[in-house]
Image (cartoon, grey):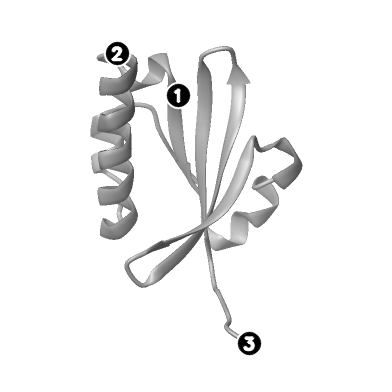
Amino acid sequence: MLKATNLEEIKAIPEPEIRKYILKKATELMTEYGVNDLNDIGCFVVLERSENQMFVVSEMEFVEVLKIENLHYLHGVKILGDSYAEDIYLPVEVKKC
């Protein structure tokens, strides 16, 4: 698990596709909410496939499947307070029927 609470930690995410996506989203959220410190409004959590038990759907405000380039992520937002949320990403394999 990698938890990023600031832009420097986001830049350290090893997978370039999700790093680029999260960096753009974090910058947009910080501008929208008028904060200089990401940790004032939330954080981003990138899980490993093996950490699927940490992605508890019933705790999420919403859940979606994101396709970022050729990768798929289960994405959920967990509200932890009035003005703080965790944006959580779990890599998944999508099989077409």
- For the C terminus, give its image quadrant: bottom right
Separation (CA) of disc 1 from disc 2: 11 Å
Q: Earlier in the sequence, mark 1 or mark 2?
A: 2
Q: Amino acid at mark 3?
A: Cys
Answer yes or no: do the residues labelled 3 and 1 have beta carbons within 8 Å? Answer: no
Q: Residue tagged by mark 1?
A: 42
Q: Position of residue 72 (x, y in %)?
A: 46, 65
- Which of marks 1 and 3 precedes in the sequence? 1
**Image: 15 above or below 56:** below
* Residue 25 appears left or right of 75: left
Give the alpha-carbon distance from disc 2 to disc 3, as whole Å: 44 Å
Q: Would you place residue 27 above or below residue 20 in this image?
A: above
Image spot of residue 74 (x, y percent):
55, 56
Residue 2: give x, y in percent of width and height.
44, 43
Picture quadrant of residue 40: top left
Residue at image point 65% right, 47% down: 55
Residue extending furthest toward the right = 58
Which residue is tagged 2?
35
- Front tag of 3 and 1: 3
Q: Residue at x 62, y 41 (%)?
A: 62
Label 2 vs 3, first from the N-terminus:
2
Is label 2 in a helix, a strand or a loop? loop
Q: Are marks 1 and 2 in contact (CB under 8 Å)?
A: no
What residue is shown with label 3? 97
